Image (tube, helix red, strand yellow):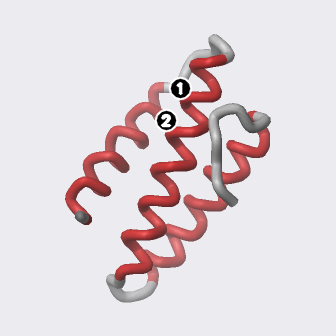
């Protein structure tokens, strides 16, 4: 499912959870291009959820900011 910041927060959160689960499955398998794709999906989901929170004036939890920062760094190394 493509994620966009203007989607309902619960749908964006569901996308984050789904992307986390997909990445966890890829980590159990041997490294492959699918892992990079799973990381990119998680990054997009996290960014959309955080953008949604910011647009609505809601605080972004520190743990989520940290996870987003780590995913950005990891995805930049996958390229």
Q: Quadrant of residue 59?
A: top right
The answer to whether 74 appears left or right of 29 in the picture is left
- Counting from the top left corner in percent of width and height, residue 15 is at 67, 53
| Residue at which label 2 appears | 64
Q: Quadrant of residue 30?
A: bottom left
Helix, strand or loop status at disc 1: loop
Task: State the CA–CA distance, disc 1 to disc 2.
Answer: 5 Å
Q: Quadrant of residue 51?
A: top right
Decide: marks 1, 2 in contact (CB < 8 A)? yes
Residue drawn 63% across the image and 28% down it = 52
Quadrant where the C terminus sits is: bottom left
Disc number for residue 71: none
| Residue at which label 1 appears | 61
1 or 15, which lies in front? 1
- Counting from the top left corner in percent of width and height, residue 43 is at 46, 50
Residue drawn 31% across the image and 56% down it = 75
């Amino acid at each position: 499912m493509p994620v966009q910041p203007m989607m309902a927060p619960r749908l964006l959160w569901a996308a984050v959870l789904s992307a986390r689960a997909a990445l966890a499955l890829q980590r159990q398998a041997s490294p492959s291009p699918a892992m990079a794709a799973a990381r990119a999906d998680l990054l997009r989901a996290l960014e959309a959820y955080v953008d949604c929170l910011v647009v609505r004036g809601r605080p972004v939890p520190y743990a989520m900011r940290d996870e987003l920062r780590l995913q950005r760094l990891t995805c930049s190394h996958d390229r």
